[in-house]
């Protein structure tokens, strides 16, 4: 059975987010949200079951690129004001469940 993958865009505590995902049995893709590469955001959305964008820790260009990629690929996305590792991963899981 394939593990669930949650992508987290933004945040400066990538290691903590990855470790929390591991504790919860979830694969996590973390990106600092500072990229201006459209293809990079597209590939993240393509490989994730859901995407969480941390609003206060992500550049506007990255937000726009990931939002467009998720729309095109039909990947569930949630925008979060929280930057806590367990909170953003939990929001990603809830996003998957509500999309099903």
Image: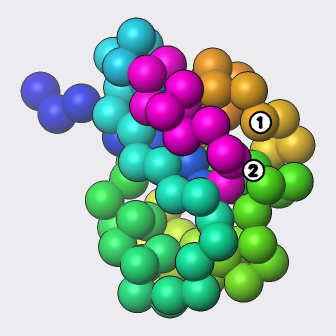
Q: Is 39 located above or below residue 14 in the figure?
A: below
Tell whether position 16 is magenta.
Answer: yes
Q: Is residue 68 above or below residue 96?
A: below
Where residue 4 appears, x then y in whole percent?
33, 34
Q: Residue furthest left?
A: 1
Residue under numbered circle 2:
54
Q: Which mark is residue 93?
A: none
Q: Residue at x 12, y 27 (%)?
A: 1
Disc 2/disc 1 C-alpha distance (Å): 6 Å
Circle 1 packing at 10 Å, graded few (<14), some (14-19), many (20+), is many
* Secondary structure category for the residue under label 1: loop
83 w.r.t. 1: above or below: below
Q: Which mark is residue 83?
A: 1
The residue nearer to you, when weighing 61 against 100, is 61
Residue drawn at point x = 48 percent, y = 33 percent: 15
Q: Secondary structure at mark 2?
A: strand
Asked if the residue at tag 1 contacts the one at tag 2, i.e. Cβ–Cβ closer than 8 Å, the answer is: yes
Q: Is residue 18 visible?
A: yes
Q: Give the main secondary structure of the magenta stretch.
A: helix
**Which of the 4 image quadrants contains residue 59?**
bottom right
- Position of residue 8 measured from the top left corner of the image (x, y, whole percent): 56, 48
Q: Is residue 44 above or below residue 78?
A: below
Q: Which residues are magenta?
A: 10-20
- On whether residue 90 falls in the magenta region, the answer is no
Determine whether, in the image, residue 39 is placed left or right of residue 16.
left
Pick whichever, 42 or 9, lies toward us.
Answer: 9
Whole-percent x, y for residue 78 in the image:
70, 50
């Amino acid at each position: 059975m394939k593990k669930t993958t949650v992508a987290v865009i933004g945040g400066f505590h990538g290691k903590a987010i990855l470790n929390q995902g591991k504790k919860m049995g979830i694969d996590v893709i973390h990106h600092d949200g500072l990229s201006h590469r459209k293809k990079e955001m597209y590939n993240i959305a393509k490989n994730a079951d859901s995407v969480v964008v941390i609003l206060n820790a992500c550049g506007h260009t990255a937000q726009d690129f990931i939002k467009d990629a998720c729309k095109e690929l039909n990947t569930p996305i949630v925008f979060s004001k929280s930057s806590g590792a367990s909170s953003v991963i939990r929001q990603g899981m809830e996003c998957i469940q509500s999309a099903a």
